[in-house]
Image (cartoon, helix red, strand yellow):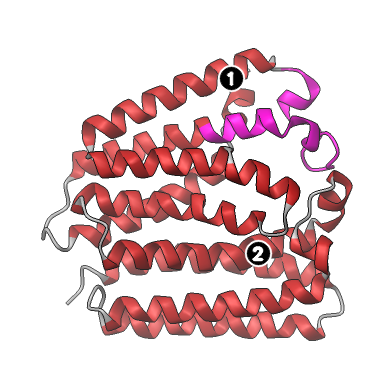
């Protein structure tokens, strides 16, 4: 039973966000010339609980959609192994605990960012993904706020670094999610979700993927241009962006779009991990 509740929180999403949140926190820590360990622990724990709560609510809201998709039709709320009322109670406990810890350990600005991310993920994104091809963009904003919260937990300030983090994560998420939508095309079509490949075709998705990768690469370079990271960061982030772009261009001649999209998805994970390490370590190097 514990395992079923654990999966309600979508742990993959939690772990991915904790990596980027840590990167934002460590990037901001360079301005203080020290890492506040307890603040880092409190920030990560609270954000993990908040994301777990939001994902549990999302599982509750999406249970009818999940029943139509092969990869989600066996989720606990779909087959009834966890009653809906208990899932909501679980989400409330997680969310309440997370916001209390976030408020106690960080600052009012970071708490507001946590509330905003929670709200955007559940309400605007929950509505938009059912009705509009732009639902992915709405969801990307919610996904980009945790690293900004990590940054602001240290600085208590929405400055240029916070803005660059927000843009970088939005631009990373768009090709990441479009790739998912391509190799899970049948699932999204069966569920009636108007994701870009279903609504406008795979060619439109491939073009958008390239545009967002370019935006990601340019934004990454701005961290060095504006003085937040060193030249090593610039060289490596440009290399990551250009190699990702090259893989994106290969999609136009791919014989198997599903295989290509899956490869793009996995490469985007490599980019995300590398980007986060670069932000954390590159900011600390002279």
* Residue at the spot of label 1: 88
Judging from the image, what secondary structure is the residue with disc 1 in?
helix
Check the picture and name the quadrant holding the N terminus. top right
Q: Residue at x 54, y 81 (%)?
A: 214
Residue 46 left/right relative to 286: right
Residue 93 location (% of width, % of height) = 46, 19
Q: Mark 1 and mark 2: span between their CA atoms?
A: 31 Å
Q: Residue at x 70, y 69 (%)?
A: 263
Q: Quadrant of residue 256?
A: bottom right
Tell which residue pokes out farthest to the left in this image: 33
Residue 233 left/right relative to 168: left
In reply to whether residue 67 is colored magenta, the answer given is yes
Residue extent of the magenta highlight: 54-81
Residue 12 location (% of width, % of height) = 56, 45
Classify 138 as above or below 170: above
Q: Residue at x 59, y 30 (%)?
A: 56
In reply to whether residue 213 is colored magenta, the answer given is no
Residue 270 location (% of width, % of height) = 53, 66
Check the picture and name the quadrant holding the C terminus. bottom left
Q: Which mark is residue 68?
A: none
Q: Are marks 1 and 2 in contact (CB under 8 Å)?
A: no
Q: Quadrant of residue 197?
A: bottom right
Classify 62 as above or below 214: above
């Amino acid at each position: 039973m514990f395992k079923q509740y654990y999966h309600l929180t979508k742990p993959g999403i939690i772990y991915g966000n904790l990596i980027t949140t840590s990167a934002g926190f460590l990037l901001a820590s360079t301005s203080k010339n020290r890492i506040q360990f307890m603040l880092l622990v409190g920030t990560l724990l609270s954000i993990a609980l908040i994301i777990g709560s939001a994902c549990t609510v999302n599982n509750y809201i999406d249970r009818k959609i999940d029943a139509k998709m092969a990869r989600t039709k066996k989720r606990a709320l779909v087959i009834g192994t966890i009653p809906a009322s208990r899932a909501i109670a679980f989400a409330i406990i997680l969310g309440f605990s997370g916001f209390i810890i976030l408020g106690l350990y960080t600052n009012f600005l970071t708490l507001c960012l946590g509330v905003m991310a929670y709200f955007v993920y559940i309400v605007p994104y929950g509505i938009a993904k059912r009705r509009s091809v732009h639902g992915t963009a709405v969801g990307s904003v919610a996904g980009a706020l945790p690293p900004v919260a990590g940054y602001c937990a240290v600085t208590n300030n929405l400055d240029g670094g916070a803005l660059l983090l927000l843009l970088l994560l939005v631009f990373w998420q768009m090709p990441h999610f479009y790739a998912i939508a391509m190799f899970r095309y049948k699932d999204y079509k069966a569920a009636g979700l108007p994701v870009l490949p279903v609504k406008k075709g795979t060619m439109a998705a491939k073009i958008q993927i390239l545009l967002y990768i370019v935006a990601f690469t340019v934004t990454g370079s701005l961290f060095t241009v504006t003085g937040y990271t060193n030249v090593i960061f610039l060289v490596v982030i440009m290399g990551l962006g250009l190699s990702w772009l090259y893989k994106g261009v290969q999609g136009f001649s791919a014989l198997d779009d599903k295989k290509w999209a899956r490869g793009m998805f996995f490469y985007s994970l490599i980019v995300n991990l590398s980007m986060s390490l670069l932000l954390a370590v590159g900011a600390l190097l002279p």
